[in-house]
Amino acid sequence: MTSPSSYSMNSPEIIKLKQHLMNMISRELENNPPLYRERDQYVRKTLTTAYNSLNIHLPGTIQQQIMRDILDDILGFGALQPLLEDESVTEIMVNGPKSVYIEKKGRLTKTGIQFDNDEAVIRVIEKIIMPLGRRIDADSPTVDARLPDGSRVNAVIPPVAIDGPSITIRKFQKGRLTIEQLIDYESITSSMAELLQACVISKLNLVVSGGTGSGKTTLLNVLSGFIPSNERIVTIEDAAELKLQQDHVVRLETKPANVEGKYSVTIRDLVRNSLRMRPDRIVVGEVRGGEALDMLQAMNTGHDGSLTTLHANTPRDALSRLETMCLMAGMDMPLSVIREQIASAVDVIVQQSRLKDGSRKVTSITEVSGMEGNTIVMTEIFKFEQTGTDQDGKVLGQLKPTGIRPFFSPRLEQNGFKLGPEVFGVNLSQMLNRGSGRQR
């Protein structure tokens, strides 16, 4: 037998011991299930008794690590539990049992964490999705879910995941970010924040555009905080992440199809249903398909002040994405009609970007000004101008107004927001040259 001092956590003997202890405790929990509030203490006591009964003598560090691993597996999410508890980790990526990466401060790093085998990864996936009524198997090898704290989870298993089960977790930040914090982080300026607050309260329709991991949902959460508390809000998401602070909120979440492929509830179904719920505001976590057309029609038929996000790298790309998603609705509509729908529905596109140094910024606030011929006219109000990078790789630049006052300014003034020309960097001659604003 191998000398106890030569054991490592990845040795076959230790893996076998851990599995044996896991089976013993699982049987005990099944035969004598404790009350939920007593589960933690019960598992710890049972584990200690089970280990002592085997009369095995291992180095203290190995014994403690075995205990921690088993407790994490039963009470938490296995090998991922320490990463989930680390508040500096923003994303966790499992590329098979032996390859786990994390994101910290915008930078990717490979960890030393490993799972025993594919089955251990799949156990974590099943533990995540079981309370949500989701399923994952060879016939349905991908799943979207969330952790109890709201963190977003995507999982993929073989045969789709060739090198073993994969898990991607976008961690939910504990504590709700405020607009003041975004200003402190230099993600946005006070003038931009003042404008966006006025836009939300004045019930302009906002689209937050950005790439994967750019912080769209975080920004949407912050913007939703400006919605007055006396309004009825309906939120619609694939996996509920939004944490609105208002009282009058109805949260809706999609439902996947059952094992027979029936009875799914899509974002589009929920957007349509929300119109019958007397909403003052509709907040869609992300539009990805034909629901974009229903969203635009809602914006155009009295549901002003709606908010949503979509994947796009620039404001102009966001309009192209909206056009494509509207065509996915299956309606036989000319492109010119779709563009008119977009131009009359969307007021502002807020571009959220993740820069090369990992920082996240609002890099553009753009007004959708109307139509000229067959083209949607856009006017950039604020933009980020990059000037270079420092020796540490930090992106240098400035968020500043373009000097153009938006056409929707009269709408803001009607709601009590008289933003001075200095907010937009406007001088008197520019205001006279621009002429009268668009009436919407």
Image: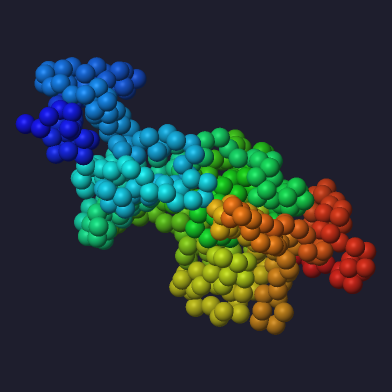
Q: Where's residue 165, x and y in %?
A: 27, 52
Residue 395 occupies quadrant: bottom right
In the rendered view, tell whether residue 24 sits above or below residue 374.
Answer: above
Q: Residue at x 84, y 52 (%)?
A: 419
Q: Where's residue 124, x and y in %?
A: 28, 41
Q: Where's residue 96, x and y in %?
A: 28, 51
Foreground pick, 244 / 252: 244
Seen in the image, is 330 located left or right of residue 346?
left
Q: Where's residue 116, x and y in %?
A: 21, 42
Residue 71 occupies quadrant: top left
Q: Residue at x 52, y 36 (%)?
A: 174
Q: Residue at x 21, y 48 (%)?
A: 118
Which residue lies most toward the left here? Answer: 1
- Scheme by which the image is coloured: rainbow
Which residue lies most toward the bottom here? Answer: 373
Residue 272 seen = no
Quadrant occupied by the C terminus: bottom right
Seen in the image, is 119 located left or right of residue 202?
left
Foreground pick, 403 / 326: 403
Residue 44 seen = yes
Q: Residue at x 60, y 77 (%)?
A: 337
Quadrant occupied by the N terminus: top left
